[in-house]
Amino acid sequence: MELQIIRENIGQLIFLNSFISTSLEYEMATAFSLSGDPSGEHILFHITVDKTIINPKPFADISTVSQFVEEKEVLFMAGSIFEIKNVTFCESSHVWIIKLHLCNDNAYELNDVYQEDKTIVSDQKSPFSLAAALLRMNLFDKAEKYYQQLLDNGSVIDISSSDLTIHCFWRLINVARNRGDFDIAFAYSRLAIEQSPDRPELLYRSHKYISLNYLEIHSISEALEYQMKALEIQQNINDTKDQFADTLFNIGFIYFSQIIPNIDSALDYFFQALNIYKEWNTYDEIIRCLNAIDEIYLNKKQKELALNYFLQALQVIDEHFPSYLPYRFNSFEHIAETYASMHDYIQAMKYYDDALNAKLK
């Protein structure tokens, strides 16, 4: 069953929740893959690693400390993210070969247009990291149980009681929202707001969480209202510019999401966010902003302007993520589609070819 799921999801991401022991020796790895039940299916994972990728989970050659030096063992950390590149069957060895490519930690966020609070979570030393991994794997019941245990046993964690409670509420909001239990998500959102009236640095984040709940159920005016409340608090406390820019981006996205999009307001907020991201050299967010801006210009039928921002995004990708294929594929495809809509089919074919080559790598 697992093999079939992988075969049906080529090009998608896989999140592995345990340490992975691998070998640099192909023959030895093949022997290990054949050592199980002879009546079952045998699988060999062929993993490629680009050492230039940004922020991968750690991996290391541990041959010198391994009990079996001849295995040439490489250990990948729990939580590693891989793109499924290909699945083939080797007739000579009767083994399924699954080709994986190690991705960086941002891979899970590639399709998230709306910015959630980036300060929540990914530190492996965080008490929330295990539940975050469970949530990524759609194990909602287990994630919820873990957060509830943190609420019940918070005294053993180096974090204040009120902070722990609010952080757990935020994460329980995520669990409920991912399940589609929006009544529960709203209940936790309001509890988080009630717990932080004197903590503006926490209160504005709670407002952003309830805003996202409203956006998910297409209550656009309420989503905008709570983002604006968050923005006002951030202005009053002189919040860090990158967090401020995230809220500006969210507001722009909400304006663009209205039934009749408020194009001018959306552009204004996207450009404000873009200027801050450029100041902070946060290149992931620069790409996201440029892509949002070019989508707006496409909506306005200003295709030359849209193309200009698509090409700017590609330039940032070339300079800072040259080997990160999902970024390149999406960028090539958008540029090709824009050229095609302008009836420049020669350029469209060129970028479609580039997209195909990026997809096949």
Image: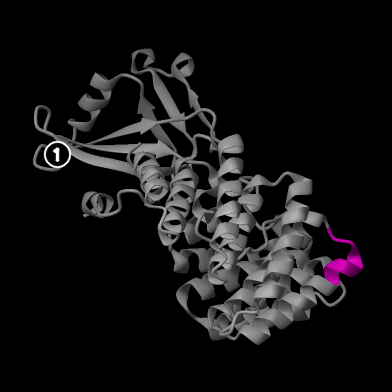
Q: Residue at (49%, 71%) from the top-left corner?
A: 178
Residue at x-position 17% and y-position 31%:
34
Q: Quadrant of the C terminus?
A: top left
* Residue 105 visible somewhere in the drawing: yes
Give left or right: position of 230 versus 67. right
Magenta span: 233-239
Q: Nearer the viewer, residue 2 or 262?
A: 262
Tell me which amino acid carries mark 1.
Asp
Q: Depth check: 344 or 90 in front?
A: 344
Residue 51, compared with residue 209, is above or below; it is above
Residue 250 pos. (x, y %): 67, 68
Q: Which residue is mark 1?
A: 37
x and y percentages locating residue 300 in the rendered image = 57, 71
Dot 1 falls on a residue whose secondary structure is: loop
Hey, which quadrant is residue 156 in on the image?
A: bottom right
In terms of depth relative to the viewer, which is nearer, 47 or 202? 47
Q: Residue at x 59, y 41 (%)?
A: 315
Is any part of residue 203 visible from this angle? no
**Residue 56 spot, x, y in % from top left:** 54, 37
Q: Pointer 1: residues within 10 angstroms few (<14), some, or many (20+)?
A: few
